[in-house]
Image (tube, coloured by chain):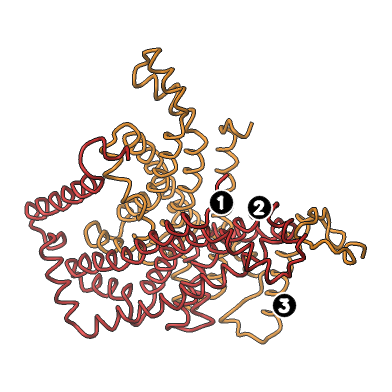
């Protein structure tokens, strides 16, 4: 590996950078000695206190539950509808401009509509998170399906394969790498959608906790929770990255 | 009719030029028009309360009215546009600069790349409350967050561009003993330009999303706040007008920047 040549294993520089940032944070916080700028120690301290609190843990569990449901729905719906549309070049060309346009609109301003029709609660924020995740997933899958090798399609036609076995034996294996990277991207987007929705209006959830602490001006709690959210987001992302790597090695058609 | 009796399945047949006599762009229009008409009829049918949904025609006419409202134009629209421009410019300059440093220094590349890779998995908007406590509800936290949110996509695209410079050209630069700034101006920037432009387009979309989202959640004024306030005051007409306005605004801004940047893109000439 050429990465080894320039001294030390690959994980040292990112770690050094992270340590430098934490050090700068600690020193500036100690120098500023301000109530609105706590150091890492205080933040972790209040995070520990929060984790001991059952109400806060209830919020974390709420967010995790809604996130899981909307993420699964976004992946499933986006992947299947995307594959079906991607098979038809004509209808992709007709429908895609609309979906791309929808996707470029800042979706958060649409959130009040969800609230009006679904009410405040799990249903509205879950649906909003779903919409934030499903559009990119759909677009990725349409593009991936449109890119399935024509040779493979012709072969399946000459073998007289049914639509179902075409999907199962040709299309799905060809789009798996894109599906995997879509799953990784879509996770972050669904989580952002959910947190924004919770920050705007919620009765529980991590986003709600953030804004509640904002009105209580408890910065150290907010920072502690931001750290927790970062960790909660990072673990599935790294797992999904690994999954993507494996799928790419196994299924990606090169040349 | 002839196509239907064919044994060749549709997915390997050549793409039809027209379906039911209409080419695909016409079907796009039909799709949008159908959606608009359906919402209009549903809203007018009386099956839904006027507090929940209003006809599209009213949304549009009210949002056109908003354009004549001085408070809206100066207080909300202009402010949001300025915030978007400021954060977009900041992230464009900073993003290309960081990507250049990453392309130059192996150490920086290895230190920063893992964070760039996972950045969009992190809900960066969670930092907004922190910034509000530190800097107040003014423009500073919005610009900071929007810049942070949009800079990373610029970095990752520009980095792809810088790294795609053909090795043979880099060698030529060495043999011509070009200085670093000459290499940057004559080789790296032009060869990375298409990727940088793609990054900038995304950067604008991200900056718009970040500014509107932060204004929507917590701000004193701005386009996002207009929608928020209308929702909280049960002013459904203004809320939908604001949503329509924001959507059209975002769409036009992205299209305009896309068209402007494509003019610089030598791959498209």
Q: Disc 1 and disc 3: Cα gap in Å?
A: 48 Å
Please name the residue that numbered disc 3 is placed on. Answer: B41
Tag 2's secondary structure?
Answer: loop
Q: Chain of mark 2?
A: A
Q: How many marks?
A: 3
Q: Colour of chain A?
A: red
How many angstroms separate mark 2 from mark 3 (CA)?
43 Å
User: What residue did someone put label 2 on?
Assistant: A149
> Tags 2 and 3 in contact by the CB under 8 Å rule?
no
Instruction: Indicate the quadrant where residue A68 lies.
Output: bottom left
Rendered-image quadrant of the N terminus of chain A = top left
**Residue in view at x 25 percent, y 72 percent:** A215
Q: Is residue A66 visible from the viewing direction of this image?
A: yes
* Front one among B103 and A179: A179
Q: Secondary structure at mark 1?
A: loop
* Front-most of residues B148 and B167: B167
Quarter of the picture containing the C terminus of chain A is top right
Secondary structure under tag 3 reads helix
Relative horizontal placement of residue A145, taking residue B197 as reference (left or right): right
Respond whether the residues carrying marks 1 and 2 are from the same subunit: yes
Residue A122 in the image: state x and y as whole percent.
43, 82
Front residue of B174 and A43: B174
Q: Which comes sooner in the sequence, label 1 or label 2?
A: 2
Give the chain letter for orange.
B
Residue A43, image x, y percentages:
15, 66
Pick whichever, B44 or A163, lies toward us: A163
Crowding near the residue tagged with mark 3, few <14, some 14–19, many ≥20 C-alpha atoms within 10 Å: some
Q: Quadrant of residue B142?
A: bottom left
For the point 62% across and 34% down, which residue is it? B268
Quadrant in the rendering for residue A166: bottom right
Residue at the spot x=68%, y=55% of the render? Answer: A152
């Amino acid at each position: 590996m050429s990465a080894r040549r320039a001294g030390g294993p690959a994980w040292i520089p990112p770690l050094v950078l992270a340590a430098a940032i934490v050090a700068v944070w600690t020193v500036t916080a100690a120098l500023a000695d301000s109530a609105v700028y706590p150091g890492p120690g205080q933040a972790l301290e209040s995070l520990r206190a929060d984790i001991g609190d059952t109400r806060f843990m209830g919020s974390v569990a709420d967010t995790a539950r809604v996130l899981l449901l909307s993420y699964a729905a976004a992946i499933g719906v986006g992947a299947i509808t995307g594959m079906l549309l991607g098979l038809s070049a004509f209808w992709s060309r007709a429908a895609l401009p609309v979906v791309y346009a929808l996707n470029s609109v800042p979706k958060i301003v649409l959130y009040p509509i969800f609230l009006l029709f679904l009410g405040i609660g799990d249903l509205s924020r879950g649906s909003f998170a779903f919409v934030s995740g499903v559009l990119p997933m759909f677009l990725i899958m349409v593009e991936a399906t449109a890119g399935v090798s024509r040779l493979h399609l012709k072969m399946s036609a000459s073998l007289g394969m049914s639509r179902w076995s075409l999907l199962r034996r040709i299309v799905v294996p060809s789009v798996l790498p894109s599906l995997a990277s879509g799953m990784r991207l879509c996770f972050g987007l669904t989580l952002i959608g959910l947190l924004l929705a919770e920050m705007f209006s919620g009765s529980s959830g991590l986003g709600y906790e953030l804004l509640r602490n904002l009105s209580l001006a408890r910065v150290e709690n907010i920072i502690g929770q931001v750290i927790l959210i970062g960790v909660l987001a990072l673990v599935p992302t790294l797992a999904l990255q690994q999954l993507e790597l494996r799928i790419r090695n196994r299924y990606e058609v090169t040349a | 009719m002839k196509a239907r009796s064919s044994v060749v399945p549709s997915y390997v047949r050549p793409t039809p030029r027209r379906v039911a006599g209409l080419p695909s762009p016409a079907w796009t229009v039909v799709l949008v028009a159908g959606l608009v008409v359906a919402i209009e009829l549903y809203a007018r049918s009386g099956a839904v309360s006027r507090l929940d949904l209003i006809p599209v025609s009213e949304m549009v006419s009210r949002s056109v009215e908003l354009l004549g409202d001085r408070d809206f134009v100066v207080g909300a629209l202009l402010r949001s546009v300025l915030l978007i421009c400021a954060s977009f410019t900041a992230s464009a300059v900073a993003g290309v600069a960081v990507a250049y440093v990453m392309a130059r220094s192996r150490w920086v590349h290895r230190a920063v790349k893992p964070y760039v890779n996972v950045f969009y998995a992190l809900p960066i908007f969670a930092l907004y409350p922190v910034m509000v406590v530190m800097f107040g509800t003014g423009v500073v936290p919005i610009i900071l967050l929007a810049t942070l949110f949009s800079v990373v996509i610029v970095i990752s695209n520009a980095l792809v561009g810088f790294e795609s410079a053909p090795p043979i050209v880099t060698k030529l630069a060495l043999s011509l003993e070009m200085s670093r700034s000459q290499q940057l101006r004559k080789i790296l920037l032009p060869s990375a330009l298409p990727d940088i432009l793609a990054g900038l387009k995304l950067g604008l979309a991200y900056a718009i999303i970040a500014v509107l989202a932060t204004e929507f959640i917590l701000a004193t004024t701005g386009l996002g706040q207009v929608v928020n306030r209308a929702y909280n005051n049960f002013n459904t007409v203004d809320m939908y007008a604001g949503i329509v306005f924001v959507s059209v605004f975002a769409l036009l801004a992205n299209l305009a920047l896309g068209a402007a940047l494509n003019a610089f893109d030598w791959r498209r000439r």
